[in-house]
Amino acid sequence: MAIQLIVAKVLRDELASLGIRSLTAEESEAIAARIFERITDLELELAARNFNIATSRDSRT
């Protein structure tokens, strides 16, 4: 996924700007992939919560 490679590059650049240069390209790509997985999980959880809230409101009427 191209966006993950961009995020990985941004992560490496940001860390380098702080003087942290020990992260390899593969490590930063793995971190970016995990970030996207966590975002997806959070989106699904929030969608489920919204659905549950809407469902509970609908059942009251």
Image (cartoon, rainbow, N blue to C red):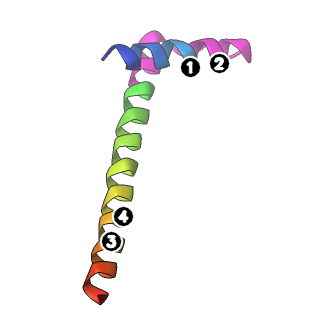
Q: Pointer 1 and pointer 4: residues touching (CB < 8 Å)? A: no
Residue topped by disc 2: 15
Q: Is residue 37 above or below residue 1?
A: below
In space, the residues marked 4 and 2 are separated at their CA atoms by 36 Å
Q: Nearer the viewer, mark 1 or mark 4?
A: 4
Amino acid tagged 4: Asn
Residue topped by disc 4: 50
Circle on res. 54: 3
Mark found first going from the N terminus, 1 or 3: 1
In space, the residues marked 2 and 3 are separated at their CA atoms by 42 Å
Give SS at disc 3.
helix
Amino acid tagged 1: Leu
Residue drawn at (36%, 64%), measured in percent from left and top?
50
> How would you classify the magenta stretch by its main secondary structure?
helix
Q: Pointer 3 and pointer 4: residues touching (CB < 8 Å)? A: yes
Residue topped by disc 1: 11
Residue 37, position as x, y percentages in the image: 35, 38
Amino acid tagged 3: Ala
Give SS at disc 2.
helix
Give SS at disc 1.
helix
Give SS at disc 4.
helix
Amino acid tagged 2: Leu
Residue sitting at the far right: 18
Q: Nearer the viewer, mark 2 or mark 3?
A: 3
Q: Residues within 10 Å of mark 4 (few under 14, many from 20)?
A: few
Q: Pointer 1 and pointer 2: residues touching (CB < 8 Å)? A: yes
